[in-house]
Image (tube, helix red, strand yellow):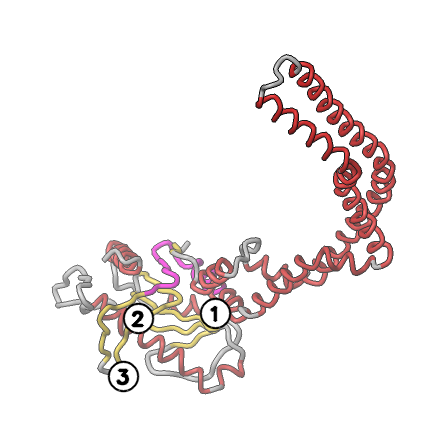
Amino acid sequence: MCTIYNPVGCLRELNSYLQQHHINDIKSLDEIFEFHKNYETYRLKIISDHKHLIEDEKNQLDLLIPKLQASIEPNKQSIEKRLLEEILHLERRYELLSEAGKSFISSIGASFKKWRLKSRIKKNKENFDQKVSDWLQTLHEQLNSKIDRQRFIETQFEAAVQQECSSLLVEQARKKRLLDGVNKTVYGALGELSVVKELQTLSDDSFVINDFRMFFDKSIYDHRNNEYINSIQVDHLLINRSGVFVIETKNWSKLSTERMDFFSPVRQIKRANFIVYKLLNGSVGNYSFNLAKHHWGKRNIPVRNIIAMTNSNSKETFEHVKILGINRLVGYISYFEPTLSPVEVNGIVDYLLKIGSGQL
């Protein structure tokens, strides 16, 4: 079975997109399709769950409110008792200080303490009712809040449910909007994975590097097309004893292949081929790879181009680019005779992996 390196590019882009938009509960293509399939079911379940929660809350309020109402009078009595005890305590301290003061009439400190105690006693008595009211205010506010909530649920049940589950529904809608926006990437990932599945059936001496990328500090000039190349991205690089295959996956409809934009992947793959060929047979910057010498002379590593169509076939033909449905992919690759040794294949794979990861 063919050895596969790296996840496919569209899947990597998709995972990055999900992380960027804080969609952490979806980890795979299957989960994306599951979300789309059951979106309305999820919404209805959220609403249903919150209906039960609101009903439970209403039942709890029905039990709690009478208890709060019944607790007001006992709380009032308890507060009044505590305040009265505080006044009695102050009055007792005042009496003790007065008795001690009979033999210390001239004591300024004692007089000042008596004045302070008398003032506190007077203030506590004058503000007695207000203090009781202030102490009970929190309890009344709590009770009124519960009564208002109970009335709201009884008269506007659906509004209460909507209010409670609104944030979850908004999040579900946000997720759907974001996932709808990456349908092209999702189906691109499906196409790339279907190509990888086909390539996996190749023999053990075949290797696939998915999402091969290179960026150049200094542009590489392609004299054939009179353009400078700053970077390349290849969906799949297949390396086996027949050479290297640059494979681009297109999950396009028949209509798409008949439009002029079909020429875009042809140009793209030729640009990638130019760089890969230079990497392996020439030199790009400080990169170089040398085959074992042959008595006939210098050998080259063949680099071929394939556009794999996962959703349709194209009748168009292009120079140096083979367009195939994925059902013909393995047969076409297997047609070519081996020209490389297993050691050379492994060396090429190691070399390309290091270049792609920036180690060279």
Q: Which residues are magenta?
A: 194-213
> Which of the pair 117/33 is nearer the observer?
117
Residue at image position (76%, 27%) is 82
Helix, strand or loop under label 3: loop
Residue 315 locus on image (x, y percent):
46, 83
Residue 181 locus on image (x, y percent):
55, 70
> Which of the pair 20/229 is nearer the observer?
20
Instruction: Using the image, tell me which numbered label, if any, was put on residue 326.
Output: 1
Q: Amino acid at mark 2?
A: Ser
Residue 235 locus on image (x, y percent):
40, 67
Q: Is residue 297 left or right of residue 326?
A: left
Residue 274, relative to residue 75: is it above or below?
A: below
Instruction: Using the image, tell me which numbered label, if any, was put on residue 231.
Output: 2
Q: Badge 2 local density, few (<14 within 10 Å), some, or many (20+)?
A: some
Between disc 2 and disc 3, whose residue precedes? 3
Q: Distance from label 2 to label 3 (Cα)? A: 15 Å
Report which quarter residue 243 is drawn in.
bottom left
**Quadrant location, the N terminus:** bottom left
Report which quarter residue 168 is drawn in.
bottom right
Q: Amino acid at mark 3?
A: Asn
Q: Residue furthest top?
A: 103
Viewer-nearest of labels 1 and 2?
2
Helix, strand or loop under label 2: strand
Residue at image position (36%, 68%) is 234
Instruction: Using the image, tell me which numbered label, if any, was put on residue 225.
Output: 3
Q: Is residue 34 left or right of residue 280?
A: right
Q: Is 212 one of the magenta-colored residues? A: yes
